C-alpha cells in the first residue's frame, strides 16, 4: 500500500466508562440528525468461532470479551453476536430452547453482563440475534404443544391434519431439504417447520406468542442490549388455507422441484410484526437490523416501514448475490439504493454465505480484491456490517468429505450443497497452533491460509488486508464527508472503474475502485459537483507501486482502490 498521509485533526469523542446505554443516549443524534447506528460499523461474531477462553474447542463470551480491545482498535462500534442462548445446536444456536438465558457452552449470565459492561467502557454496543420464526423442538413451549391437542401451547405452533395417510397437508418444502411438515405420532398431526424439523415455526397469529416474544426482547433490552438482528423474518406467516405453492421448472440443490414460495414467504402480515417489534425497541431506544433477503430495492424499502416504523437497518443482502465484479452492476444498484431515500445497510458476507474473499478471488489478486471490496462497503453512504475475519482476508474452508460436515444441510445435500461450515471456521489470531483460537482442537478446522492471514502477522504489515481495513475504518471516523456526505456517482460510462464522491459542505472524498484485472487510466470531470478547479489530495490507495504524478488522469493498478480528498 502506498499512500500520502494527510494531517487531519482527529476528533476525540468523549467516552464515559459508566454511562449506561439509556434510552436518551441511544436516541441522541448528531448535528446532521444521525443516531449512533447510522454511522456505526457493526461486526458480526459467530460465537462458536471467535475466541475460546476455556479451551474446549468452542468459542465463548469470555473469549469475545478478551478481544474487545482488538475490536476497539479496529474501529468497531457494535458487535452482533449470533445466537448464544440455550440450544441443542442442531442449527448451531438458531434452534433456541430458552430465549432468556445463555447457553452454558458460551458462559453464564454473569459473563454476559461482564461483556456488556466491558463493551460500554469501550463504547462498543452489544446486539443479539433474535430468532423470531421458530424455536427449538426442545423449547418448553413446543414440548407442551406436542403433548396433546388440547395443551396450553398447542396453538403456539402450526399443527394440521395430513391430506390422507402418509400425506403432508400440502406441498411446501423446508429450505433445508425435506418436506416442511413433520408428522408427530403422539397426536397424529403434522407440524410446520420452514427450517430443520428441530425448528418448529411459531404461530405468530396467536397473540400469546406475540406477547411472549416481545417480552423476550424487553428482557434483553433491560440487560443493556442495544438492539437485535432479526432472524429469518420472511417466513413468519403462512397462508391459513395452506394453498399449494406453484411449481417452477427445474430442481433445487436437493433435487426437489423448484417452487414459487408465494404462500409461505413474505406475506404482508410480516410487516405488522416488524412494527410491533419496533414498538418494543423504541421503548428502549434500541435498533433493529433485519435479515432481509429481498429481490429488489423496492422490497427492501418496504422493510423500513411506510412511516419509518419498521426496521431501522434492514440489511441489503443483494450485493452478496452479484456474480463477478462488474462496475456497472454495482453502480446501478448503489444508485437505486440511494434514490430510494432510506439509510442503506451494506453487507458483503455473513455466516450463511461463502466468504467474500473466496467469492471474488481470481487466484492472482486475492488480497487486492479483498481491499477493493472493503473500500467499497466502508466508504458508501450507509451503515456497514462486517463479518469476523473479513478484515484479515479469511477464506472459506469447505469440508473435504461428507464425514467432516457439521452443518446438517451439508450432509443432506452433499456434494452439491456442502453446508455452511466453510465460512464459520475459527478466527485466525496468529500463526500458532489452531491459529491462536484455542489450545484444544477447534470444532471446525482452520484453513492453511492462517499461516499468512492472521491478526498477529497482519498487524505488523501495513500492506496487509488488515492494515488496509484499519486505515479505512479510521478514515471513516475522521472524515466528515464519509459519515455525513451525500453520494454522487461519477464517470457513469466507465465499464471498469466505479467512481463516486461523498460530498459534504465544501469538501468531498473521492473513491475510485478498479474492478478490472487490467491497468486503467481514469479521467475525472468534477464540473457536475460545482468544483471547477478542485484540489485533489491522495489519502489512501491499495497500490503496490508509488503513485506517479500524472496530468489529467489517475493511473490505477488492477483491482485497486484510490481515495482522495477534494477541496474547492
Ligand atoms: C437464518 C440464519 C441461519 C439459520 C436460519 C434458521 O437464515 O442466518 O444461519 O440457519 O436463519 O434460523
Ligand atoms: Ca469455550
Image (cartoon, grey):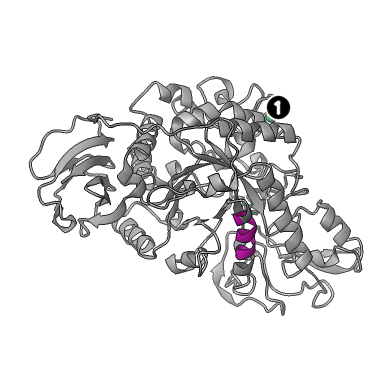
Q: Which of 393 and 68 is in front in this view?
A: 68
Residue tagged 1: 56
Mark 1: secondary structure: loop
Measured from the top left, where is residue 102 in percent x and y? 73, 40
Q: In this view, does 552 lie to the left or right of 384?
A: left
Q: Is residue 479 left or right of residue 27?
A: left
Q: Which of 233 and 265 is in front in this view?
A: 233
Q: Is mark 1 within 8 Å of ligand 2?
A: yes
Q: Nearer the viewer, residue 165 or 206?
A: 206
Residue 134 picture quarter? bottom right
Q: Residue furthest left?
A: 551
Task: Tell me which secondary structure the magenta stretch mostly adopts.
Answer: helix
Please say whether residue 254 is visible from this viewpoint: no
Measured from the top left, where is residue 95 in percent x and y? 72, 50
496 within the magenta span:
no
Q: Residue at x 39, y 37 (%)?
A: 473
Q: Which residue is drawn at 51% across and 23% down?
A: 430
Q: In which quarter of the image is ligand 2?
A: top right
Other-residue count near label 1 (Cα within 10 Å), few / some / many at <14 / 14–19 / ≥20? some
Q: Which residue is drawn at 28% across and 35% down?
A: 542
Measured from the top left, where is residue 378 in percent x and y? 38, 44
Residue 250 picture quarter? bottom right
Q: Nearer the viewer, residue 161 or 143?
A: 143
Q: Residue at x 62, y 55 (%)?
A: 281
Q: In this view, does 226 lie to the left or right of 496?
A: right
Relative to 482, does residue 328 appear above or below in the rendering?
A: below
Relative to 5, does residue 180 appear above or below in the rendering?
A: below
Q: Give the quadrant of the N terminus.
A: top left
Provide the residue span drawn in magenta. 274-282
Measured from the top left, where is residue 455 in percent x and y? 47, 26
Residue 374 picture quarter? top left
Q: In this view, does 378 lie to the left or right of 412?
A: left
Amino acid at each position: 500500500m502506498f499512500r500520502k498521509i494527510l494531517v487531519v485533526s482527529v476528533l476525540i469523542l468523549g467516552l464515559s466508562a459508566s454511562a449506561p446505554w439509556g434510552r436518551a443516549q441511544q436516541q441522541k443524534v448528531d448535528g446532521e440528525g444521525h443516531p449512533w447506528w447510522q454511522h456505526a460499523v457493526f461486526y458480526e461474531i459467530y460465537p462458536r468461532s471467535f475466541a475460546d477462553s476455556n479451551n474446549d474447542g468452542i468459542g465463548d463470551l469470555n473469549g469475545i470479551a478478551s478481544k474487545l480491545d482488538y475490536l476497539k482498535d479496529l474501529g468497531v462500534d457494535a458487535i452482533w453476536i449470533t445466537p448464544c442462548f440455550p440450544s441443542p445446536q442442531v442449527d448451531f444456536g438458531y434452534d433456541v430452547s430458552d430465549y432468556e438465558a445463555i447457553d452454558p457452552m458460551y458462559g453464564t449470565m454473569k459473563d454476559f453482563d461482564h461483556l456488556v459492561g466491558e463493551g460500554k467502557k469501550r463504547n462498543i454496543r452489544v446486539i443479539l440475534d433474535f430468532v423470531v420464526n421458530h424455536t427449538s423442538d426442545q423449547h418448553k413451549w413446543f414440548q407442551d404443544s406436542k403433548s396433546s391437542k388440547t395443551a396450553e401451547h398447542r396453538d403456539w405452533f402450526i399443527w394440521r391434519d395430513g391430506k390422507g395417510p402418509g400425506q403432508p397437508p400440502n406441498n411446501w418444502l423446508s429450505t433445508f431439504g425435506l418436506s416442511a411438515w413433520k408428522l408427530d405420532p403422539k397426536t397424529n398431526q403434522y407440524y410446520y417447520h420452514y427450517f430443520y424439523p428441530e425448528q418448529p415455526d411459531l404461530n405468530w397469529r396467536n397473540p400469546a406468542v406475540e406477547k411472549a416474544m416481545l417480552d423476550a426482547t424487553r428482557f434483553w433490552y433491560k440487560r443493556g442490549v442495544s438492539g437485535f438482528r432479526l432472524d429469518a423474518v420472511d417466513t413468519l406467516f403462512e397462508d391459513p388455507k395452506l394453498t399449494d405453492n406453484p411449481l417452477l421448472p427445474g430442481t433445487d440443490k436437493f433435487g426437489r422441484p423448484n417452487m414459487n414460495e408465494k404462500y409461505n414467504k413474505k406475506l404482508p402480515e410480516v410487516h405488522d410484526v416488524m412494527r410491533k417489534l419496533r414498538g418494543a425497541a423504541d421503548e428502549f431506544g434500541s435498533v433493529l437490523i433485519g435479515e432481509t433477503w429481498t429481490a429488489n430495492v423496492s422490497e427492501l424499502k418496504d422493510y423500513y416501514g411506510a412511516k419509518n416504523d419498521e426496521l431501522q437497518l434492514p440489511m441489503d443482502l443483494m450485493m452478496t448475490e452479484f456474480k463477478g465484479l462488474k462496475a456497472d452492476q454495482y453502480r446501478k444498484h448503489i444508485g437505486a439504493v440511494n434514490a430510494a431515500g432510506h439509510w442503506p445497510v451494506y453487507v458483503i458476507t455473513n455466516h450463511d454465505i461463502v466468504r467474500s474473499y473466496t467469492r471474488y478471488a481470481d487466484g492472482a489478486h486475492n488480497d487486492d480484491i479483498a481491499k477493493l471490496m472493503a473500500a467499497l462497503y466502508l466508504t458508501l453512504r450507509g451503515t456497514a456490517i462486517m463479518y469476523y475475519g473479513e478484515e484479515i482476508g479469511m477464506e472459506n474452508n469447505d469440508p473435504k468429505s461428507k464425514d467432516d460436515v457439521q452443518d446438517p444441510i451439508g450432509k443432506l445435500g452433499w456434494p452439491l450443497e456442502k453446508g455452511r461450515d466453510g465460512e464459520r471456521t475459527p478466527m485466525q489470531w496468529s500463526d500458532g497452533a489452531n491459529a491462536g483460537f484455542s489450545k484444544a482442537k477447534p470444532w471446525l478446522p482452520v484453513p492453511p491460509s492462517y499461516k499468512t492471514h492472521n491478526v498477529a502477522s497482519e498487524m505488523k504489515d501495513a500492506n496487509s488486508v488488515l492494515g488496509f481495513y484499519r486505515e479505512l475504518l479510521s478514515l471513516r471516523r475522521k472524515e466528515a464527508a464519509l459519515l455525513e456526505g451525500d453520494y454522487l456517482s461519477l464517470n457513469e460510462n466507465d465499464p471498469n472503474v466505479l467512481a463516486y464522491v461523498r460530498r459534504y459542505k465544501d469538501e468531498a472524498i473521492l473513491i475510485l475502485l478498479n474492478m478490472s484485472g487490467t491497468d486503467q487510466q481514469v479521467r475525472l470531470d468534477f464540473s457536475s459537483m460545482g468544483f471547477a478547479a478542485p484540489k485533489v489530495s491522495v489519502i489512501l490507495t491499495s497500490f503496490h507501486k508509488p503513485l506517479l504524478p500524472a496530468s489529467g488522469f489517475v493511473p490505477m493498478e488492477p483491482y485497486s482502490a484510490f481515495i482522495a480528498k477534494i477541496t474547492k
